[in-house]
Image: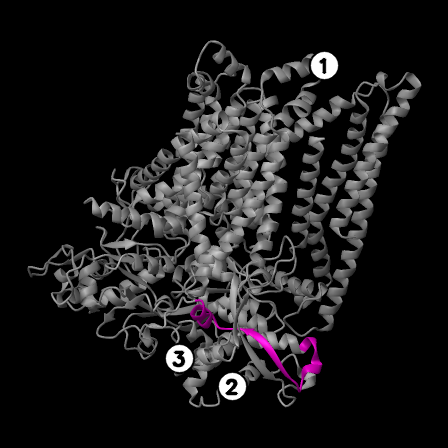
Amino acid sequence: MFKKTILLAAALGLIFALGAGNAQAARDYISIVGSSTVYPFATVVAEQFGKTTSYKTPKIESTGSGGGLKLFCAGVGVEHPDITNASRAIKSSEKEMCVKNGVKEIVEVKIGYDGIVMANSKKSAPLKLTRRDIFLALAKEVPDPKGGEKLVANPYKTWKDVNPSLPNVKIEVLGPPPTSGTRDAFAELAMEAGAKTFDWIKAMKKTDKKAYKAVCHTVREDGAYIEAGENDNLIVQKLEANPDAFGIFGFSFLDQNTDKIQGSYIEGVQPTFDGIAAGDYPVSRPLFFYVKKAHVDVIPGMKEYLKEFTSEKAWGPDGYLSEKGMIPMPDAERKQYHNAVENLTPLMMK
Amino acid sequence: MSPYSLMILLLCLSSAAYYLGKKKAFAVSADVGGARQLHSRPTYYGALAARWCGIPALILFAGWLGLEDHIITGMVVSELPETLQNLPADRINLLVNDIQNMVTGNIVSREVDDVMRAAADHYRHLQNISSAALAVLVLAVGIGGMLWVRSRIVPSLRARNHVERIIRYLLIFCSTIAIFTTIGIVLSVLYEAIRFFHAVPVTEFLFGLKWSPQMAIRADQVGSSGAFGAIPVFAGTAMISAIAMLVAVPIGLMSAIYMSEYADRRFRDAAKPLMEILAGIPTVVYGFFAALIVAPFIRDAGTTIGLDVSSESALAAGLVMGIMIIPFVSSLSDDIINAVPQALRDGAYGLGATQSETIKQVVLPAALPGIVGGVLLAISRAIGETMIVVMAAGLAANLTANPLATMTTVTVQIVTLLVGDQEFDSPKTLAAFALGLVLFIVTLLLNVIALHVVRKYREQYE
Amino acid sequence: MGLAAILASLAFLSLLFISIIGKGYTAFWQTYVRLDVHLSADQLDRTELETADYPGIVKKTLRSMFPEVKSRGDKRKLYALISSGAAFQIREMVLEDPDLVGKTVSVWVPADDDVDMLVKGHIERDVPEEARRLTDKQLAWVDALTGEGRVEKRFNRTLFTHGDSREPELAGIWGATVGSFLTLAITLLLSFPIGVASAVYLEEFAPKNRWTDLIEVNINNLAAVPSIVFGLLGLAVFLNFFGLPRSAPVVGGLVLTLMTLPTIIIASRAALLAVPPSIREAALGVGASKMQTVFHHVLPLALPGMLTGTIIGMARALGETAPLLMIGMVAFIVDIPGGFTDPSTALPVQIYLWADSPEKAFVERTSAATLVLLAFLIVMNALAVVLRRRFERRW
């Protein structure tokens, strides 16, 4: 009979739902959330950790830095994550939220650097850019090309307009949206540095800081800069399909696709592993993770995971993270953070 | 006894109750002149017994499991030494996790001391008692219910009415789940949306013509203040959905008519499930397809005829989305057209109508309400679709009527705003909730209008 | 016209399939390298077999095969030819049979993903050295190995038996498949009965008044709610309010149930509506109660339509990523989920995550995972066809 089937199914469904409600007690794995930029590196460590120790492999969610910190700061307890990855440092409002919810002690660990590259298809020639060129090509308002200390809406259509030594190709840059930490870092490291080359804009920093930042960080919205979402593989493939376009993304994607795309020279340095590690390549930003100190003793494997992450074979210059495209920190900095992890030095909470 | 085996036992018990009830019904009726004298058919007595056996026990079971963990934990914690008990609540919570890990035989994060071991033993002990008690109680209630009904079975018991009432309540309960879902959605976005409207005025959000959430995402950084006018975002959604419907409705409807009226049975049996596969392909795959194959193709085609096509045009996303929702239109319409009584067709043929006249003037009008239902479902799906547009439609909010330009949709904005790196209480993240809420209200209005329109034209044919 | 429309959509379907299969079929093979590993007793202390230095053994084996490699940088390049999974494979082998210690065994271990890509022809040899993931030396080593018959493409069993991994050659979809199965089991068990029950109530029993109008509008509206909003709902209600665990299939199943319900209800109502009133009148006329009429006569006739709606709804649930993002199922999970509350991921999520990985070898694996997902879909649809054929009636 049909209604029997329905009832039976409903009953079975109920069992599962109940069984679920019941079995959720203990957690025996580390729960990690956070940035999608750190995700590819954290997962390597987690896998290594899971395979070489008797602990379970940690669960790593890719939620974005903001979403990760929100979950992380929601409180202490098994239902909250133990570690959050971030592609930017924690903000003061987030610290406040943490303290308010009882997460009083968190340990900040910088794990290395991620180079941000501007790349195009190998079918065209590589660009040799300065940060000034980048600023002029991508900012919403640029100094009037006719001279004078006045800002006008970005008039440049081709790279040649920006700098006569560049090719006569339409400016078309695929990059991350304003919600992305990558975009933020790019704006600060490439565009702001480029804007500073104009003395009068640099002077603005002292007189009107807000306007200065607005000039430096606002990206043009007339179609030359295309917000292309967070899927960097897609950007790589779009670059391949469109040789005139440029893309902005993390170094590891360039590293894996050297046969299809090439990084643009910035200030005369091409984004290579050695160039970024030596600090010659100007556009790279730090990556972090944050640890909830209260959880270190109670969630199985936390200490060992931290030890694995901060070991030389992981984040060292020859470690397996560098193989995946993460740029290691200099020796002194590595030592400093290694000690911070060993002593679990908490971050100052205002 | 584990909850699962108990549950299965309970199911067996209630089917036993069914047979006992049925047998009893036959037995009591034998004295008064056979099953004919029963008020209801014998199976209803069985069904009634089974329900009374199963449902109360199930409720007890659910309640017990819901509270069990809480009570046991409380009891274990109260047995812990003073020093541990004075810890803040969240620390105790972590401690209990450790104890539970120990109970289930997992790795524990610290040295196992006597206190912990004692606590774990205590926990295990309580757990055993609890599950034994649960098993006894549930089975007792089940058997009790069964016996109670059995004792009440007399020929005049209106078993069918009782059973039907129970089923009716169950049906009502099921149909209210939709209401609860709606309430849940509104509640879960409302709070954050209100916080957003504190930062950005409602009027600016609803009537603003510029969407550009370029805000600073760190404290030491200022950036521009950003513009939160939702009109371009909604216009983009409407445009892309419209393109999708322009693809899906004609293709879907024509396929449905062909399949149900012209094609032979074998072709239909093969074609229909094949088309339904289109609806099930993960939208991520469609997204890749739209972004890497369709969009460059449209771009190149446009360039050759002298049009300036954006590499992330609304057209590409809309086309691919339209293909995805074809089955929503075709399968549902096909079912509906198929259900139009043959008598109607025969009548039309009898009056001398040709096949195409019959379809146009008799079958389609008869099937219209169902077809409109399918189309509405397809529109809904198009509006709510996320991954295709995330990958193919881009993020720039342009207010334009040109399908070749880049446009963005509500869902794209929600996703990018929610999974971004910015802090979670900035207006940028909160805007996602506001967008969700407004989209919800807009579609609600559309649906109210659609309901009235459909009702006006709906006719039931015989 | 109609035929053309059908053919157009089928043509698109086959285009999609061809492009996926074309990219994905190579992932079903994986390059393996045969190593003659000497499990010397010096390196393997019988009492500490679990923690012995297995990567060291693999490295030593490689060095002995290419004794000419001396410099540190070259050695690293040499080691990079073999997957890091080789050490784990040997470890498992030794643990299973401790008597192997002291012997030399010949094992096939997975090659690194770059070597795999080279063998499959995804890395071109004739481009300049710096534009390749493999250096000229590495190419020479691979060629030497191939010459000795030590390189072979075999069926990629790992893909179907393992969970996720960051090393493409070790990554599998079994974990995600189990996760999807658990999630869908809950979705089907809850959404089909509830959906059919609501449709029956609304269409057959409910009085036509404002209250039922409200429910109807509501359901139509829920169908238009973006799936990510259902994720928000799941986060707020199931995780924060009911305290269910994050990343668990049970929560995924509940969220997807709420998401597919409107589809099922709408399709089921349409199917009920299509049952001619004469059926009901006839049943009522011979004295059946309203409930009997509906359940014994109307419902069986409406079932094919309901099944169609359910299958479409389930297919959508199977392919859905966005709501799972909010409830923590977009995650890196290596262990195979064992129950409804273990952390797990789902097939479309796995596809999404792999599509976002920088490693090139994940491209073909993404397509392969899609193929597996499509295979499930086809099985589900075939099931629907069988059911439909059994019940369908035309009058």
Q: With B236 as the anchor, is B82 left or right in this view? A: right
Residue kind at label 1, given as amino acid type? Gly
The answer, for residue B174, to whether it is visible in the render is no
**Quarter of the rendering occupied by the N terminus of chain A:** top right
Magenta span: C95-120
Q: Are marks 1 and 2 in contact (CB under 8 Å)?
A: no
- Residue C74: image quadrant is bottom left
The answer, for residue A266, to whether it is visible in the render is yes
Local packing at callout 1 (Cα closer than 10 Å; few below 14, some 14-19, many 20+) is: few
Give the SS element for disc 3: helix
Residue at the right extreme, as displayed:
B31
Q: Nearer the viewer, residue C185 or A66?
A: C185
**Mark 2 and mark 3: Cα distance apart in space:** 39 Å
Q: Nearer the viewer, residue B235 or A18?
A: B235
Q: With C17 as the anchor, is B160 left or right in this view? A: right
Residue kind at label 3, given as amino acid type? Glu
Count all numbered tags in the image, as a single digit. Answer: 3
Numbered circle sitting on residue C65: 2
Q: Nearer the viewer, residue B228 or B321?
A: B321
- Residue A281: image quadrant is bottom left
Residue kind at label 2, given as amino acid type? Met
Give the SS element for disc 2: helix
Residue at the top extreme, as displayed:
B351
Question: How is the structure coloured here?
Answer: one colour
Q: Which residue is mark 1?
A: C287
Q: Position of residue A178 (x, y in %)?
A: 32, 55
Q: Is residue B340 magenta?
A: no
Q: Which residue is mark 3?
A: A333
- Residue B25: image quadrant is top right
**Mark 3 and mark 1: Cα distance apart in space:** 87 Å
